[in-house]
Image: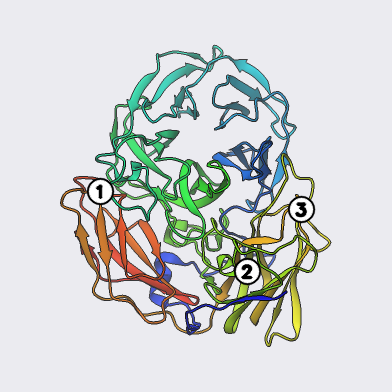
């Protein structure tokens, strides 16, 4: 049976990058000895573990990332182990011994060439060779959930913890020379303040007032020291929300007192294909540049159905902490490639197939074809079976340059519980005319478990059509895709900037504001950027199919500035009109 979906949208002109946006958003491709520079695309392309109990779903969350002995080490929750990498692209999984590895929220620090690890509800463990996975318990010091270990420049060690909708984040000093016994009592620092802090409201971006002003989960502490200041980040309002984010308090001492940073939340990604940017760790890459690795949410089959995403981070000259989530699920350069990611780390490859005409071999009624092209990881297309030969095809409308693909498999109908010893098999073909096809990705032999398989092509190809054909679907699932995402250039023009930008702050509730603008022909969507100063528009929302946006993530008593950008499958045009409320 052949089913078909045709977008109501007309095919847009497909275009090149708009040059004035380059200094802020995109980075010219660096020279790289082996060819193209390494790139990544969120959510991270990892073999996320199926959990051991029903419903069948994958999960990884609460990531700690550190650099140890010249490698990146990634410790996420609920993965039965951790990963290591020399280049942030190719990862090796380590199965440890001696750890309560299935507990939530691992945290790690290094002292004297040894790693120290703890997790919610456990003591502290030590390893001098984590690559072999051998650990031993060295302290029975406990925490209050979602712990974070921090070693200061003077060698003193602190433990932060807290995970509650009532109790505060807190911290204490530990003695690393005496079994990490507490040197101080646990000091409570802060709890949620939802009536004032919009980022703590338990609500989705599309929810309408009145919002619940209590019950936000305050969790996920992490400490970063920069330029003599201590940045204690925390997560809110709950891991299941698209607006899951990190705020930050700043102090002059690792045990406070701490003052709320008015630009919070600093890590926020409530819109786009992959959403959520909470419960994170902030780390420095091999070259000393800051990055932020965060929890991203699906939360459909289970509240804790989650993934991981990584974003450039930095500090402004006056000490504002920044996490760059702008088009944060588009291809970007891997850590260590760009000398200064704060000046632009995106490749400039745009999404080519948003809401384009598509066909499939078969379709489940509850999971239509358009769901593979709607830029929402929480929805998906599914074939009726997982049999070899099921396929999905998209028409880009005209010839486009394809630089990369990201295949996001949805595991529809999976019965898998626990670690998967299998992988997806498929072929991705392209065509200029829909008749003669060329294979650009062949996983039919090299099956691997890559639920978010990201493939940057060695050389770009020009094509109008793309088709993915199933050769093997693991775990008893049907062949299903939440996003068949093709990136490159539409070889045309970027849309014009929007006019008539207006902002209305809610007089009765300063957490709310509505931003509006005039629609722009040829735009796939808009990006509302905002911040606490004209030159600090670091937060953003993506908007599709509308010329107005209501947000609830502002802070009472804080003034904001806004602008609106446009984008399509060939580029971004930055707004130049900055409006204050």
Give the residue at x 65% y 29%.
101
Q: Is residue 338 left or right of residue 581?
A: right
Residue 456 shows up from this direction? yes
Image quadrant in which you'd find residue 35: bottom right
Residue that lies at the very extreme toward the right in this rendered image = 445
Name the secondary structure under disc 1: loop
- Distance, label 1 to label 3, CA atoms, is 45 Å
Tell us which disc is closer to us: 1 or 2: 1
Name the secondary structure under disc 3: loop
Give percent across and percent down for residue 195: 25, 39
* Residue on which disc 3 sits: 474
Image quarter hosting the N terminus = bottom right
Answer few, some or many: residues within 10 Å of disc 2's Cα (few below 14, many 20 plus, some between 14 and 19).
Answer: many
- Distance, label 2 to label 3, CA atoms, is 24 Å
Image quadrant in which you'd find residue 435: bottom right
Residue 534 shows up from this direction? no
Name the secondary structure under disc 2: strand
* Earlier residue among tags 1 and 2: 2
Q: Is residue 394 left or right of residue 261?
A: right
Q: Is 152 or 546 nearer to us in this picture?
A: 546
Residue that lies at the very extreme toward the left in this rendered image = 507
* Residue on which disc 1 sits: 511
Figure check: 379 above or below 501: above
Image quarter hosting the C terminus = bottom left
Figure check: 327 above or below 109: below
Q: Is 265 or 175 nearer to us in this picture?
A: 265
Residue 404 numbered tag: 2
């Amino acid at each position: 049976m052949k089913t078909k979906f045709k977008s109501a949208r007309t095919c847009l002109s497909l275009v090149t990058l708009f040059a004035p946006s380059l200094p802020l958003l995109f980075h010219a491709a660096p020279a790289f000895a082996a060819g193209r520079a390494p790139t990544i695309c969120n959510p991270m392309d990892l073999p996320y573990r199926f959990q051991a109990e029903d419903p069948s779903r994958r999960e990884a969350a609460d990531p700690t990332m550190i650099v140890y002995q010249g490698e990146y080490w990634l410790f996420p929750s609920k993965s039965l182990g951790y990963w290591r990498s020399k280049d942030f692209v190719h990862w090796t999984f380590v199965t440890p011994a001696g750890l309560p590895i299935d507990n939530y929220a691992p945290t790690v620090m290094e002292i004297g060439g040894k790693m120290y690890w703890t997790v919610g509800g456990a003591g502290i463990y030590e390893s001098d060779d984590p690559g072999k996975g051998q650990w031993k318990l060295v302290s029975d010091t406990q925490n209050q959930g979602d712990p974070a270990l921090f070693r200061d420049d003077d060698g003193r060690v602190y433990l932060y913890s807290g995970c509650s909708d009532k109790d505060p984040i807190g911290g204490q000093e530990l003695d690393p020379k005496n079994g990490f016994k507490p040197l101080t009592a646990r000091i409570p620092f802060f709890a949620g303040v939802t009536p004032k802090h919009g980022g703590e409201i338990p609500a989705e971006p599309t929810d309408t007032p009145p919002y619940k002003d209590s019950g936000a989960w305050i969790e996920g502490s992490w400490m970063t020291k920069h330029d003599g200041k201590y940045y204690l980040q925390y997560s809110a309002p709950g891991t299941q929300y698209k607006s899951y984010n990190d705020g930050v308090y700043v102090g002059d001492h690792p045990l406070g007192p701490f003052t709320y940073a008015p630009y919070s939340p600093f890590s926020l990604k409530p819109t786009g294909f992959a959403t959520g940017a909470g419960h994170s760790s902030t780390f420095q890459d091999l070259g000393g540049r800051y990055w932020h690795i965060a929890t991203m949410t699906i939360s459909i089959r289970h509240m804790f159905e989650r993934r991981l995403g990584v974003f450039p981070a930095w500090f402004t000259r006056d000490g504002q902490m920044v996490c760059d989530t702008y088009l944060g699920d588009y291809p970007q350069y891997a850590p260590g490639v760009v000398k200064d990611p704060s000046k632009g780390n995106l490749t400039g490859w745009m999404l080519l197939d948003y809401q384009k005409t598509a066909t499939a071999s078969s379709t489940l009624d509850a999971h239509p074809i358009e769901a593979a092209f709607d830029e929402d990881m929480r929805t998906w297309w599914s074939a009726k079976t997982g049999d070899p030969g099921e396929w999905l095809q998209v028409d880009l409308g005209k010839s486009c340059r394809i630089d990369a693909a990201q295949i996001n498999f949805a595991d529809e109908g999976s019965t898998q519980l626990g670690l998967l010893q299998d992988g997806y098999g498929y072929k991705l073909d392209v065509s200029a005319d829909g008749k003669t096809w060329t294979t650009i990705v062949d996983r039919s032999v090299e099956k691997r478990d890559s639920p978010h398989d990201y493939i940057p092509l060695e050389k770009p190809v020009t094509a109008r059509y793309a088709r993915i054909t199933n050769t093997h679907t693991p775990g008893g699932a049907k062949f299903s895709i939440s996003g068949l995402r093709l990136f490159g250039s539409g070889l045309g023009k970027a849309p014009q900037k929007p006019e008539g930008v207006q902002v209305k702050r809610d007089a009765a509730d300063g957490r709310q504001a509505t931003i509006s603008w005039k629609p722009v022909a040829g735009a796939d969507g808009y990006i509302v950027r905002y911040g606490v100063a004209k030159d600090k528009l670091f937060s953003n929302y993506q908007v599709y199919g509308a010329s107005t946006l209501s947000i609830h993530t502002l802070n009472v008593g804080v003034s904001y500035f806004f602008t609106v950008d446009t984008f399509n499958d060939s580029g971004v045009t930055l707004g130049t009109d900055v409006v204050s409320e």
